[in-house]
Image (cartoon, rainbow, N blue to C red):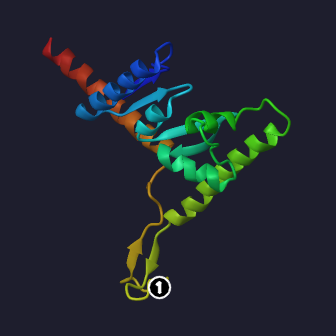
Amino acid sequence: MLFLDEPTSGLDAYAAMLLVTNVSRITKDRQLASLMTVHQPSWAMFSQLDRVILMAKGGVYYEGPPRQAVTWFKGLGYDVPEGVNPADHFISIAEESSEGSKERVKHLLDSWAEANRRSSRDLMPVYQDQDTGKPAKDAKAKRTWGQQYPTTAVKEFSILLTRWWWEQVRDLLSHSHSD
């Protein structure tokens, strides 16, 4: 796993985009996962990422594909104004700097938490009649899942971190045996 803390800080937009493009290519070629913090990304950079996690007050208010964020926030009433970088907009609506901003941030956090509660319920297997598509009770019914991602980003991170740790231990042991 590759961890990058603000790798684009101090870079112009072109250099930052090249960096993200190269990190993406390298991690895919080497079958690595990467996690990076990025402040004030351009929309081109933001939308190139596989998944993003937007946080405020220590909580998540969006996690998923960047392009789907536009639809998510529009559904909450936070449509991106014309001519505004959507990534900047998503970050700015979670700042507590004005009257009513605490309520807005609470609304963002609560909305995401509620969506996750609903999707967790949707992850429970639902057995459906193959002909009607309605819930069925018999064991021969088709099992379906109502979620795009079977796990949360936190669970994926935990699995990747554990796998990385065991690879490090294995490599360390293999090097010590070869000496």
Q: Report x, y in % for residue 173.
A: 24, 21
Image side of residue 25 versus residue 159, left or right = left
Count of numbered marks? 1
Residue 172 lies, with reference to residue 159, above or below; the image says above
Residue 139 lies, with reference to residue 101, above or below; the image says below
- The quadrant in which residue 15 appears is top left
Determine the residue positioned at 51% across, 26% down: 37
Determine the residue positioned at 27% across, 28% down: 26
Residue sitting at the far left: 178
Residue sitting at the far front: 83
Determine the residue positioned at 61% across, 56% down: 115
Looking at the image, which is closer to me, 10 or 107?
Answer: 10
Image side of residue 19 versus residue 170, left or right = right
Residue type marked 1: Ala
Instruction: Look at the numbered disc 1 and give the secondary structure of its residue.
Output: loop
Residue 107 lies, with reference to residue 42, above or below; the image says below
Q: Report x, y in % for residue 166.
A: 32, 31
Looking at the image, which is closer to me, 169 or 115?
Answer: 115
Image quarter in which the C terminus is found: top left
- The quadrant in which residue 141 appears is bottom left
Image quarter in which the N terminus is found: top left
Q: Report x, y in % for residue 165.
A: 36, 29
The residue singled out by tag 1 in the image is 136
Residue 76 lies, with reference to residue 14, above or below; the image says below
Residue sitting at the far right: 99
